Each structure stands twice: as C-alpha cells, then as structure tokens.
Image (spheres, rainbow, N blue to C red):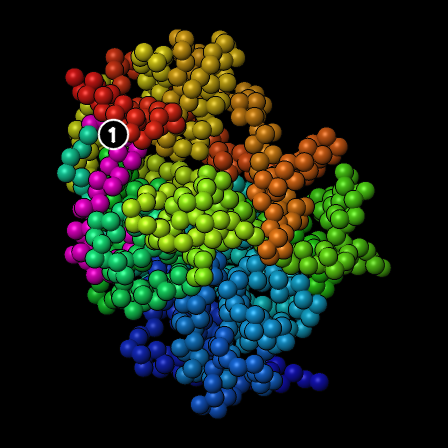
Amino acid sequence: MKDPHDKPTPTRRPLRQHQAVRQVVEWMNSHGWKPFPFQKQTWSAYLNGESGLIHATTGTGKTLAAWLGPVAEALAEAKVAKPGSKTSRNETAAGSSQDEPPLRVLWITPLRALAIDTEEALLKPLQALLPGWTLESRTGDTSTAVRNRQRKRLPTALITTPESLSLLLTRPDAQHQLRQLRCVICDEWHELMSTKRGVQVELALARLRRWKPELRVWGLSATLGNLDEAMSVLLGNPLPPAGRLAPAGRLAQAGRTGTRIQGETRRKIVIDSLIPDTIERFPWAGHLGLRQLPSLIDEIERSGTSLVFTNTRSQTEAWYHAMLGAKPDWAGQIAVHHGSLDQQTRSWVEDGLRRGTLKSVVCTSSLDLGVDFSPVDRVFQVGSPKGVARLLQRAGRSGHRPGAVSRATCVPTHALELIEIAAARDAISAGFMEGRDPHRQPLDVLCQHAVTVALGTGFTPDDLLDEIRSTASYSDLSKQEWQWVVDFVSRGGQALRAYPDYHRLRETGGLYIIGNQKAARQHRMAIGTIVSDASLIVQYLNGPRLGTVEESFLTRLKPGDCFALAGRTVELVHIHDMIVWVRRAKSSKKALIPRWMGGRMPLSTELAAAVRHRLQQACEGRFDGPEMEAVRPVLELQQQRSLIPLPHQLLIERVRSREGHHLFFYPFAGRLVHEGLSALFAWRLAQKRPATFSMSVNDYGFELLSPTEVTLHRDDIAALISDDHLASDIDQSLNAAEMGKRQFREIARVSGLVFQGFPGQQKSARQLQASSGLLYDVFSNYDPDNLLLKQSRREVLERQLEHSRLLATLKELRESEVILSEPNRFTPLCFPLLVDRLRSRLSNEQLSARIARMQISLEK
C-alpha cells in the first residue's frame, strides 16, 4: 500500500516550492524579520536536494536557515492540516493521531540544555505554517511518559542527542520508524566533530544513509577554522591527508556533494579588559585572582544582564560565592550555571536569563552554545580564554538586541594574561581561528556501534563494513581491523574467549545479533562516549537535588564537612546508595569548592602565535593598547635582565640559586606540549650525564631544576631537539605504558568491556579502574597486539601531550635560532614557573609569604 505521506509527483514542484518559500518569507515578515541572503541560499540548496554546512556567527539566524528548508518542502508537497489543530510538544497528551506525518526531520544537539531552547525556536514557525506537524525532544531529561509514547510513534520532527540517536538505532523497528526521514541537522557541529561523540554521529548517519540514500544532512557551525574539513566529515567523505584541505565552497568526494554557506557576520564585537590598578613586575598564575572582584562588581552594576564565564566548574562556584559575599543583596539576582548542576536548577537559571530577571550568571562552557538570551548585553571572561574561537563564541552570547554591540570584557588573573587578551583581539580582527581535528578510527566507538546495530536489525560483516567505510573517520579501515572488531565483540578476542560475559553477539546464518537479554540491557544503559570520574547525586534531606560531584572529591570529606554546589553551602550528612545527603550549612562554616576532573586548557597554536607577535612589537618598543601599556613594566624588565624572544627564536635561561641549577625553556607551545618536552629534555639530558630534575610547566615554557650543574653547549641543545629515536625517547621519558593504562579505563567503558552498573548500583571509580586495569594487564600479557591497547597509547599521547603539536614544535625549534641567556637573577618570564613548582609543596598562606619575600628580593 502506498504511504499517504509519500512525495507528490514533481510536475509542479518548482512552482510549489516557490510558493512555499514565499509563505516562509511572509511569516518572517510578520514578525518584523527580513530573511538574510544566506538563509534564502540555504532554503534553495535544501529544496534542490543538497547537503551542506552553514557557517555563521552566533545570533545571526543559522537555526531558521536550516529549519525553514524542511518546512518549505513540506508546504510544497502536501496540503497543510486544518488551521487551529494543535502542534504537539513534549507535553502533548498520549494517543497522537495516526494522521500526523511520520518522522521527517532529526535535529541533533550536543547539549541537553540546548534541546529546550531549540524546541521553542523551531515551534514558532510550525504553529503558523505546519500545525499538523508534531515536534518533540528526546534526551536524558525526557520524561518516562514521553519516552513510552515515542516508542510507539515518533513525532514529525525530533530533537535529540548523539546518545539518544544511537539508542533509537537499537530498536528492531528503527528502519520502519525512520522510513520517511528526509533530513538530519547537526547543530553546533564544530563542538561534536572533534570528539568521539562526533564519531558516534558519523556512524549513525552512515546507518541512516544506508536506509535513505537521498537523505540530506546539514551542519550548523560557528567559530571554526577548518570549515571544509568539517563539512567533509559531516558528509562522510574521506579526510584529506594531514596538512591538506579540500577545495573551498563545494566538495565532491566519494559521490557526495555539499555546499558550504557563509552566513552573516556579526555586527561589531568589542574585546576589552579590566586593567588592574597596579601591576607586579614579577607576576604569577592567579596572583590577581579575586583582587579583581571589586572592579568586576562595579562593571556588572553598570551593565544590564551579564554572563561571567570561567574556564572550570570550580572557578564558577568560587567566583559566585565571592560575588555573593561581597554583595549579599544580590541574592536571587545572580546565579551559577555549569554541567554538574541538576537539570531543574539549570532550567531555572536559563529561564531567568530569558526573562531578564537575573542580573548576572557565573557559568562555564555550559552556556557557550546555541541558547539565545536576548537580555544579555555584556559578557565577562575570567582569566585567559586560551583560544581565539572560545573568546569569540562567548562574546557572541551578548548584544542580541537590535542595534546592540557584542562585548566581552576580560578579567585577567595574572599580568601576562593581558598580553593574551591583546593578542586574541588581534587574531579576531585578522580572522584567525582555531580548527578542530576530527578523530580517526577510534575502535572503542566502533565496537559499541557494532553491538548497537546487532541489537537493532543485526548485520552481516561485509555489508556493515561497507557502511562503516562510508564515514570519514573509518574510510581507511582495513578488513583485518574490522574482522578483529567483530571477533572481539562476539567472542572476546584472543584473551577473553573463555569468558561468556564477553560474548556479546552471536552469529545466526551469517547474521550477527545480540547474544542475550543481559547484554542488551547493559548495552542500552552504557551507550555513549562521555566518560568521567564516577559522579554522585547531591540531594537535600527531604529536599530537591542540587547536582553531582565526583567521587574523587568526596573521598576528602567526612560527615559535618561543608562544600559549595549550585551556589549554596551545604553540610555533608552521609553517603548512601550513590546519593550524597546534605543539609543547609551554618553561615559561619567555611565551604570547600569541589574539584571536577578535566585538564587545564592549553594556549592554542593560533593564540600563541598572536602572543609572540605582540612580544615582537614590545621588543621594538611598541606597546599598543591599554593591555600592553599596563604590562609594559614587566616586559621592559624582562628585556633588561634577559631578553624577549622573537618568533623563530628559542630562549633558554640558565640561573643558579640556593635551590640548585635552573634551566628555563620558552617554546610558547602550550602547557600540554611543554609537559611532554620537559620530560623528553630531562630524559635526554640524564642519558648523557646522570642527573635528577624537578619540573614545572606553563603555556609559555618549562623549568628543569637540578641539584647539580648541567652543562648545555650547542651540541647538547641540538641533541635535545633532535628527531633521532624520538618515538622511543618519548615513550621512555613519559612512561607511556602506565599513562596508557589510565587512559584504557575510558576505552574499556566505551567499548563495553566494563559496565558502570544499573541505576542505584553504579560501580565506584576505584572499582572501574581496577577492572579496566586488570583487563589492560591481561591484554598486555596475553594479547599484546590488541588494537584497543594501541589505541589507548595513541590517545594518551595526543590528549595529554598534544603529540602532533609536540612534533611540530620540535621541528620548529630545530629551525629556530637558539639563544642561551644567563641572567644573574630570576626574570619575569621564569617567575611564574618557580611559583607553580612551589605551589605543590606549600599551603596557600606559606606560598603567599614565600612569594612576597621572593618579589622583594628580586626588586632590589
């Protein structure tokens, strides 16, 4: 029987499409909006059956550009339901009409928090243009009633996350439920493509394209440097070799074409700073810190609604409590927002921002994306943004009112960050932007996907291999690697064949399907690639939930201790069944700030280059802008005692003190690269002459401290930066095997080797680490060619040391002029490295006193 929602014959399609677009334009005009040319270009490309990528800055209409194409197509194809019929949302009563169109549009969002706002934005045109359509979301926050309804029938348009999309593919009837799917829209694609969640989306898209070859896929992106590569990944085209990009504009590889559409450029963006009243000539990380609080409060008072961005959740809680302590009358007018808060709390904050009832919100990247808060007229960035794109993205959260300017005011936490702020402004003006590198062949994600497909429709290996190779990430997957994956998920591989729990799939007549119901339940619970330390829910006794904290933080606490969460100070009562029960703390008690896992962000390559350009100008006596004028005394002292390194120069400072012999290297390559270089250089020096070293690193350089003198001639320096035996030297200097063992916990979880447990029965982080560590040892001893072992070592080098950037830095150092300076006292550039090393040994009070004495001595 012919489906009543099949496409009409194309005899009058161009005319109908023209009329449909005119309806869309009239709807926009009725709201006082005039379509931008890029929006019309997108609608035309969509109606012509094309896929592509829309690149536009925040708040310029990307959402409507992507959404109104499918709306216009529906208007052109069929009669619209009678006016006055209700457009469904998640609150629609059960028992939706079978006359509603089946699922036609999937909208993938990277954050659950974005789903609510996206739903509201997409709903508005539907109510006027397609009242017969239903629109719902499906995320981890979706109610059980809505989930049950969606199992029977999906809405016409579904907003979902990568994890929920993979869950949808585990349904045996998934292909039937998606039979009318026309379009997939990937929102904030720049956030997904460089993560394993992006690979998860790639694999899901390959499955959907197999079922619907004519499927159109569109990505939305802002603040991204490698747009053509991003579109290539989205379309499932093979990635170009490293360092080469495909031609701009249109891509035509592997039979798929795509159009890149450039959206509107945001109106003027202002980047400025809160300049400290005094600048210490020997700065150190965090030395300004909350000393900037009074200035920040003054600026917030002069602004309307503002967002105060920090780089970590711990900083968010700390700055919120400091603000509230300084301005108690702001209680109820300011709030805190980050990913570890309960969903109801986050929703309350977001609603307050929309309505303009909150004066300021202290937040992390949880408010970086997508959500449009029109009342926000100013953004503050605490500390260096560490990247050009991050600062531009955050600045774009402000100034959405007509005629408004987007403004981001940076609040430096130490003097050298003023250089980074000035450099970021330069990079934005010049159009420099960081790219995002896609993942290549993460086999843990592929193992998970193979079980997902087996749980749904089942698969034959050759057919699924062809499908998998249609993704960018796995386009070069060999048949031997794929056979290893199939054997691993079905029989446990070489080392685990004797253990039935690892036989997750079984073969029936050449078709691989799920092995048993236990494996099916565990897999559905474990789908996803987000792995963190085990988190426990924090809840009031006889009260609401506040959010989550990680197990590693709670091990430091005992009943009666107080900590801060969601802007409140709470007292630990007890922990039971993975729930942290708390009560309100007395105001006199001091609160600890939770620590969440997550490394400190390194300075990006693009921002580091801009910083070096600013330093070159300082060498020439040019201190343009208020930030550079403020930091001028610091840089002039650096030039006086040593020198300011120019681009393509490697400065090495050698200083002797009572602690020993210090070597300071300044590659300006970011802290992760410097962690690798410091270990590599220490190893190579020790191989020539036995020595022990203490190390400290920051974004500008690193220190090697030895109790004995280390000679450093030209030949020695050449040996340090040589590429001879580089791979083995890196492995030995870093103990890469042990680091890989820690990384293997994530890979074991994603691939399904370890199971975190059902709700209320979750395993602790220690149990998970023990289980994954045992498996790592088993594979190392009995299956040394295990591909997941190789992946763990590769990932740990790239994630913890930016391995590819480290190699590029070494190449650059070999081509640089090496300058060995021997100042008689410490310099402003090396002082932060000294403090970072002391920080791990001294309490805050001891550290402050020690730093003060050092500064007085160095100023003499």
Above or below 589: residue 46? below
How many discs appear?
1
**Would you say 433 lies left or right of 206 here?**
left
Q: Quadrant of the N terminus?
A: bottom right
Residue 479 picture location, percent across and down: 73, 46
Mark 1 Cα shell of 10 Å, populated few (<14), some (14-19), many (≥20): many
Q: Secondary structure at mark 1?
A: loop
Residue at the image position 31 percent from the left and 38 percent from the top: 610
Which residue is identified by label 1? 283
**Would you say 543 lies left or right of 235 here?**
left
Q: Is residue 232 visible?
A: no
Asked if the stretch drawn in magenta spans residue 301, the answer is yes
Residue kind at label 1, given as amino acid type: Pro
Above or below 413: residue 531? below
Residue at the image position 27 percent from the left and 18 percent from the top: 826
**Would you say 373 lies left or right of 206 here?**
left
Q: Nearer the viewer, residue 545 or 309?
A: 545
- The extreme left residue here reads 277
Residue 398 picture location, percent across and down: 28, 59
Range of the magenta residues? 281-308
